[in-house]
Amino acid sequence: SIFMEYYYCNIAVRTKQVLKSKKTLATPGVKNIVLVDGVRTPFLQSGTIGLLNRTGLPKDAVDYIVYGTVIQEVKTSNVAREAALGAGFSDKTPAHTVTMACISSNQAMTTAVGLIAAGQCDAVVAGGVEFMSDVPIRHSRKMRKTMLSLNKAKTLGARLSLLGSIRLAHLAPELPAVAEFSTAETMGHSADRLAAAFGVSRLEQDEFALRSHMLAKKAQDSGLLSDVISFKVPGKDIVSKDNGIRPSTMEQMAKLKPAFIKPHGTVTAANSSFLTDGASAVLIMSEEKALAMGYKPKAYLRDFVYVSQDPKDQLLLGPTYATPKVLEKSGLTLNDIDVFEFHEAFAGQIMANLKAMESDWFAQTYMGRKTKVGAPPMEKFNTWGGSLSLGHPFAATGCRLVTTVAHRLQKEGGQYGLVAACAAGGQGHAMVIEAYPQ
């Protein structure tokens, strides 16, 4: 179990500022659903430090637990339930696990919102976990078939015959798929093609990646990443901060070779998110219950959407499709949003989305819109770093994005934030978050 130390971590609000006087998105007769708190482990480059965290919580603290994970461990396929039991939750608290690639914890959070809105629950823990340092590696299909047959073999002769049929090729392991099942293309390869399609240069990608690392370093040094909690890894030191933040120079980044399309591609290790271990969690409650329990919520979780599009040529364009949909649903415009947090899978993917959002032609040709969506202004965009620098444990990133929006709104005195992310399978998500009045 690696996830429960974050649940009740009370992170004090350091800054109190007056919100701008915009309308609230509260709807008469509809429950207000709030983010009470959100925390995460430090995000760690795979192979550097493992995650193992166990702690107990009051057994009746939550009604339900929803967790996301992408690379599933066969022994703990319902990791939410196993982690909850391992962390000392009541065995009467139901838990289930969701998977939706890079938006798995977004799906966990919106599932929590649905449970509360439907009146089924008042308090739900949602989150995500990814442990890329120890992914399950399978035998080849031929070897699996032989081993299953061996298990069923009745006689010694039959067993010896099956053992004799094993060839060296049978022993080749099967790694978890890094390619899209529907297209057989890796996400990095697709990102490189997407960047080329939108005319995103290697220079633009390296500049954006450098920006991400520099902003993350500044935020870390300034103590702004207050959702990160320290913990003691058995046999190791205390881990207290993300270890993938490494501001470089444009000169050093320019030396790297293309990682996917060689020799002319523009996506490199420096302008891509790295394999990461990490876990995140948020406590989501009805406003009424949160206040009754003495909590001061951080934000309201408002409208959200999920989108899907062509997984071949538009694999990573989820934010472009999801952003206008969620804005229209909320009755807001791009100018109403004070804080943007987009998932950075690749610098090329972010730049391609920004260019698509600024394109009338793309809006008219592919989105059935008369005019462009418009791109977020960079002074409001991922200003505390992003997945390129902080790291991207696949299923844990969504909670980080939402918690960061809540903290930035508090710090900056804004009212509305927008989270958006792409995901494997050509899917995407966006959510509007409203600051809780200070």
Image (cartoon, rainbow, N blue to C red):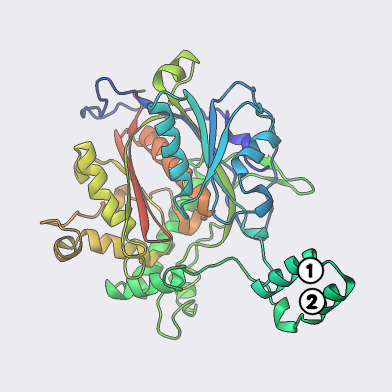
Q: Residue furthest top?
A: 292
Residue 129 position within the rendered picture, expressed as x and y whole percent measured from the top left: 57, 47
Q: Secondary structure at mark 1?
A: helix
Q: Is residue 227 visible?
A: no
Instruction: Identify which residue is drawn at 69% across, 30% down.
Output: 88
Q: Are marks 2 and 1 in contact (CB under 8 Å)?
A: yes
* Residue 162 badge: 2
- Residue type at mark 2 is Leu
Distance of label 2 from label 1 (alpha carbons): 7 Å
Q: In the rendered image of this protein, does residue 360 appear above or below residue 186?
A: above
- Residue 313 lies left or right of residue 262; in this view the side is left
* Residue 150 badge: 1
Q: Quadrant of residue 148?
A: bottom right
Q: In this rendered view, identify the residue nearer to me: 245 or 249.
A: 245
- Residue 332 lies left or right of residue 257; in this view the side is left
Q: Quadrant of residue 205?
A: bottom left
Q: Secondary structure at mark 2?
A: helix
Instruction: Identify which residue is drawn at 60% across, 39% down.
Output: 229
Q: In the rendered image of this protein, does residue 412 appear above or below residue 355?
A: above
Q: Residue furthest right?
A: 156
The N terminus appears in which quarter of the rendering? top right
